[in-house]
């Protein structure tokens, strides 16, 4: 059963709607503010089947990461960025290179934070918010 994602501009939130039966997209309204002014989000994760596959892929990527092995961490970050189609940018590329050369990950992380790359720098949920419910 397909799940469609819609963005409510009023709430600045993405909601997931289960398109069961003959429910039509024009019948949908925001579960919070009730507006029907919703924008369809075209996402590669918009169906249940592709979502579970991608979760499994992500989980297996995570399983490869050894926190005591900076090289495997650097490799995992590169792979995830690559899969998300994100450009790491020169600063992060440089930091990963240092990680792979065996430098202290905590020191590198601290320097990245000073440059404005916090914990939310990679893989963070973008604004808008995403409602975990299914409507
Ligand atoms: Zn709303």
Image (cartoon, helix red, strand yellow):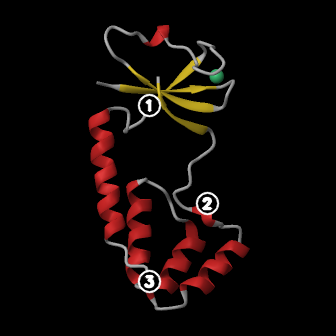
Residue 110 vs 103, above or below: the answer is above
**Callout in the foreground (1, 2):** 2
For the point 55% across and 38% down, the residue is: 130
| Sequence-earlier tag: 1 or 2 | 1
Mark 1 neighbour density, 10 Å: few (under 14) some (14–19) many (20 or more):
few
| Quadrant position of ligand 1 | top right
| Sequence-earlier tag: 3 or 1 | 1
Give the mark count.
Answer: 3
Mark 3 neighbour density, 10 Å: few (under 14) some (14–19) many (20 or more):
many
On the picture, is 70 further left or further right than 63?
right
The kind of secondary structure element at disc 2 is helix
Q: Position of residue 12 (x, y in %)?
A: 66, 31
Q: Which residue is tagged 2?
A: 120
Q: Which mark is residue 42?
A: 1
Q: How far apart are marks 3 and 1 (CA)?
A: 35 Å
| Sequence-earlier tag: 2 or 3 | 3
Mark 2 neighbour density, 10 Å: few (under 14) some (14–19) many (20 or more):
few
Q: Distance between the residues labelled 2 and 3?
A: 19 Å
The kind of secondary structure element at disc 3 is helix
**Callout in the foreground (3, 1):** 3
> Looking at this view, is 127 or 134 the one in front?
134
Query: Which quarter of the figure has residue 44?
Result: top left
For the point 32% across and 48% down, the residue is: 54
Q: Residue 98 carries which label?
A: none
Q: Which residue is tagged 3?
A: 70
- Kindly indicate whether the residue at mark 2 contacts the one at mark 1 (C-beta within 8 angstroms): no
- Kindly indicate whether the residue at mark 3 contacts the one at mark 2 (C-beta within 8 angstroms): no
The kind of secondary structure element at disc 1 is loop
**Disc 3 beta carbon < 8 A from ligand 1?**
no
Q: Position of residue 76 (x, y in %)?
A: 39, 70
Q: Where is residue 34 in the image (x, y as percent from the top left)?
A: 62, 14
């Amino acid at each position: 059963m397909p799940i469609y994602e819609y963005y409510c501009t009023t709430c600045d939130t993405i909601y997931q709607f289960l398109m069961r039966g003959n429910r039509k997209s024009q019948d949908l309204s925001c579960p919070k503010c009730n507006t029907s002014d919703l924008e369809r989000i075209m996402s590669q994760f918009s169906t249940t089947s592709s979502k579970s596959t991608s979760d499994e892929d992500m989980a297996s990527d995570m399983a490869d990461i050894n926190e005591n092995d900076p090289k495997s961490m650097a490799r995992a970050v590169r792979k995830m960025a690559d899969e998300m189609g994100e450009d790491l940018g020169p600063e992060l590329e440089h930091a990963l290179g240092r990680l792979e050369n065996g430098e202290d990950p905590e020191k590198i992380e601290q320097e990245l934070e000073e440059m404005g790359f916090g914990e939310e720098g990679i893989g963070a949920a973008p604004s808008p918010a995403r409602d975990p419910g299914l409507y």
